[in-house]
Image: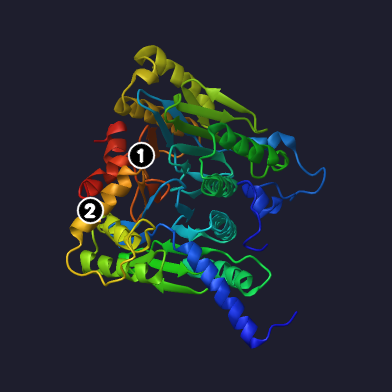
Amino acid sequence: MSLLEPSSLGMFRDLVGEDAVPRPRPLVKEGGHSGADIDTHATTVIAVKYRDGVINIADRRATAGNTVMYDQAEKVMALDDHTLISISGSFAKSIEVVRYLRHAFKYYERSQLQAMSLDGKLQELSRVIANNVPAALQGIGAFIPIVSTFEVGGSGPRIFFYDVLGGQFESADFGAAGSGSAPIRGVFEYIIRTKGPFRDMDREAALRESLTMLEIAADLDTATGGSAKYLPAAKYIVEGGIHDFTEAEVKAGLGRA
Amino acid sequence: MRYSPYEWNESINQRNDYIEDKLKEGSPVVALTYDNGILLLTLRRSQRKIYEIYDRLVFSAIGNQSDIESIRTGAIDIAHREGFSRSPDDVSIQRIVGFAVSPSIKKIYADPYAAPVVLRALFAELGKTPAEDQFFIVSYDGEFTSNRRLATIGGTSYAESQMLDHLKSSTGVEVPTLEEALKSSIFAWAIGRIQTDPSGSDDDTEPVGDRTSEVKAFVSERLEEGWVVEAAILERSTRRESRYRVLKDEDLTAAIAFFA
């Protein structure tokens, strides 16, 4: 393409071609798969809304079957200055998806001179997850993200979670994904009933309670790493953008000041 | 149809005159390294002039808006395709300007039946250290030059060199802070703009001595007429996802106050 030809309307997948869009590559011969093994999202990621924004934490273990592959995986990643994606499932696929989405959002913003709307971004993510369904059914490369964002001048903190088909749901106050997420649903309810809702907590208290949930998930789920070797990843989004919790803050939250 | 050498020469000269005449009206753009990144600055009446191309690449130009747009979107396309299929580290100013932008402009310039690209463009790339920052200026004929530390584009080459002289003397050897860089850039912009301002005098004499009061008056007149300072930075160290940031009014107040 010549440089001086008219450009696409900020549609990144038109620019790079459909082949570059994350999608399944058939690896298993026809009929050779079992749909029962779809649940491979071994990890725990948690997003909660607190008084001033939204907190995202995740363990750092990456597994393959029964083997711990890596203990320093970064599962909470920035998509833009006010949006975090926390991933569960196939790590390789997730990295590819995040790279694709970052480029797609930035390409739109830089070429069209306006930021892509939140709905536009979520739609793009849904499409990528839906494209991935065949691979997920084959038991390869399933991934399920949680998206947290802070809408400046809009409705503030928001959390979205997904099912494996790309269906998108908005959560009022809490989102969790990964194999460790089911055991801690009850813990979350318990915290709300005994300590009050997260949205009334300050940052410190909300971090402490979220880390408690993550520690419980690590105790109950083999695929979720604990905090003994490496501290969990912890970030928060407020009106001013995305921040990392400091090591000291995370340690304090774990009661190890 | 074939050209004789004489006709070819004539046609090129006419092209240059036509383009340079149009560029004269352009509001200059100043780019320089400051201690935490790169600053691009101009004053404008309406259309936005400074654009982000990629993670570490910014662009600004004077000329026909439609030509600026096609170069801008073309560069963005190439940078994103490259950055996605290889790595963001492989998107370099040298490759974008040298292999994509410059040859395309040259091709159009050399075609006597094509409308020439009316533009003088400035690309800047943020390096890991101030010494690695790079500035490229691309002309309407496809020729390009590269600079370190600072670069300017303006209506005439004389205006550009005046601006450069001012920047060199006002920022000195040390890499300036953002505050100093803003002040020097507005000053340099005025020096360049005074040269080509349609409302200005036709006095061609070499300006001498301290021009502070003349520049201050010129800048505050423009601001009163509704011109606005447009400034954007690429930050070398930031915790934000994007290095590019358009400066807000409150970031500019101190620098503008100097010219009041």
Q: In the image, is residue B228 above or below residue B73?
A: above
Report the residue at 37% width, 65% height from top: B152
Report the residue at 37% width, 45% height from top: A230
Can you give x and y, in whole percent of width and height, for residue A34 in the image?
75, 38
**Residue that mark 2 sits on:** B216
Labels 2 and 1 positioned on one and the same chain: no
Residue in front for this viewpoint, A66 or B37: B37
Q: Quadrant of residue A215?
A: top left
User: Do labels 2 and 1 touch, CB within 8 Å?
Assistant: no
The three-letter amino acid code for the residue at tag 1 is His
Q: Quadrant of residue B166?
A: bottom left
Q: Is residue A12 left or right of residue A199?
A: right
**Residue that mark 1 sits on:** A243
**Chain letter behind tag 1:** A
Query: Can residue A224 be spotted in the picture?
Result: no
Can you give x and y, in whole percent of width and height, for residue B117 in the image?
57, 64
Query: Can residue A201 be spotted in the picture?
Result: yes
The three-letter amino acid code for the residue at tag 2 is Lys
Residue in front for this viewpoint, A38 or B55: B55
Can you give x and y, in whole percent of width and height, for residue A36 in the image?
71, 34
